[in-house]
Amino acid sequence: MTRFAVAIFFAAISLGASAQDAVPAPPQVAAKAYILMDAATGTVLAEHEADLQLHPASLTKMMTSYILAREITEGRVSADDKVVISNNAWSQNPIFAGSSLMYIEPGMEVAVSDLERGIIISSGNDATLAIAEHLAGSEDVFAEMMNTTAAKLGMTNTFYVNSHGLPDPQHLTTARDLAILARAAIRDYPEHYAIYKERDFTFNNIRQDNRNMLLGEDPTVDGIKTGHTDDAGYCLVASAQREGMRLIAVVMGTASKRARANESRALLNYGFRFYETATPVAAMTELARPRVWKGKADHVAVGVLDDLQLTVQRGRAEALEPEVVLDEPLQAPLAVGDRVGTLTLTLDGKTVLQQPVTALAAVEAGGFFARLWDTILMFFSELFRA
């Protein structure tokens, strides 16, 4: 193998930068469980009992709306479709007594787009059940869809029984799983995620405010969802973006509406103050241009196909030291995306990330005589290297 120090691309890196002060401990958070995650990288910045299974209350609706966004995006449902409201989804269904509602009635024909806002903004249990029935035929079948989706997302400690989150002893999730779900919603369906920042929604001449207090108190917050039952306490999944960094904070089991907002704010402020999301290598940036044998081209640009991001202590991104180790000899044919080596990033002498580097361009195999000539050259090259 040959080592290439990527000196030109990283010329601005200050290799002699002195180590910064250690990041202080996270704030004390009055919640049964919490987690703070970098949405871009999935790095956890703070956590407590993040894998403790708890009742999610209306945070359940994040999964219902995620599945709805997927069904719309993939064309199986249209936002303009009309849903005929069943007796089960009627706002006066006794199981909904005292809970959040959109106030829909049996026989109504309601657009999917309105029901989506009824779920996300009004937190309507009636709207949630109406969508579950529309997408799956029954809530039981929809719960199976929820659990299948949770498994695919890596939500290993979550089990759904219903679409809305009203109490059931088996209906459980964790702070970590909710952060994973929030990250997926932001990444996979940004147009639908944008609904979470809308401040109010009016249906049937009834105006309801979004229950996420942080939307009105911090302009960088643009989601996500509140939840409350006696069993769950007051819960909030919040997300904010500042200076190119997006964080997700989950608090479960706080004592009040105000407490869930304050504790979430404390976590977000801590994360933004002491960390940043760095992009030390941008997509399609040439990190090296090694020799290629037996090809129509003699060299190929290598790098990464997607932006390489990681979470670092604020102010330390420029101290990252990169090194590319190539798998030699490289021989044609090569396709775009073929692995050709490894990029290692270190900080203060410690490896913080290893990532495959790939060919950024295709190299076709050369003709017979070109391949033969390169075979001879490779033999002598390896001979003299030994």
Image (tube, rainbow, N blue to C red):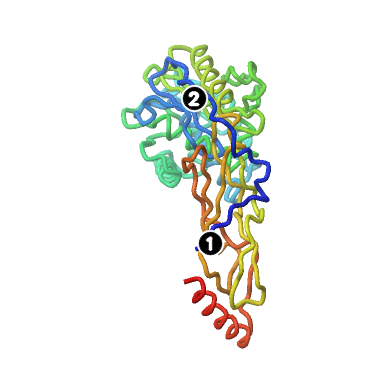
Regarding mark 1 in the picture, which secondary structure is present there? strand
Q: Earlier in the sequence, mark 1 or mark 2?
A: 1
Q: Are marks 1 and 2 in contact (CB under 8 Å)?
A: no
178 relative to 324 in the view: left or right: left
Residue 119, visible in the rendered structure: no
Q: Which mark is residue 2?
A: 1
Amino acid at dot 1:
Thr
Residue 216 position in % (x across, y down): 65, 17
Residue 264, visible in the rendered structure: yes
Residue 355 position in % (x across, y down): 51, 51
For this rendering, which residue is in front, 318 or 36?
318
Q: Is residue 294 above or below residue 228?
A: below
Circle nearer the viewer, 1 or 2: 1
The residue drawn where x is 51% and y is 26% is 249
Q: Which mark is residue 22?
A: 2
Regarding mark 2 in the picture, which secondary structure is present there? loop
Examine the image and state in which quarter residue 168 appears: top left
The residue drawn where x is 56% and y is 39% is 40
Neighbourhood count class around disc 1 (C-alpha, 10 Å): few under 14, some 14–19, many 20 upward: few
132 relative to 11 in the view: left or right: left
Neighbourhood count class around disc 2 (C-alpha, 10 Å): few under 14, some 14–19, many 20 upward: few
For this rendering, which residue is in front, 165 or 108?
165
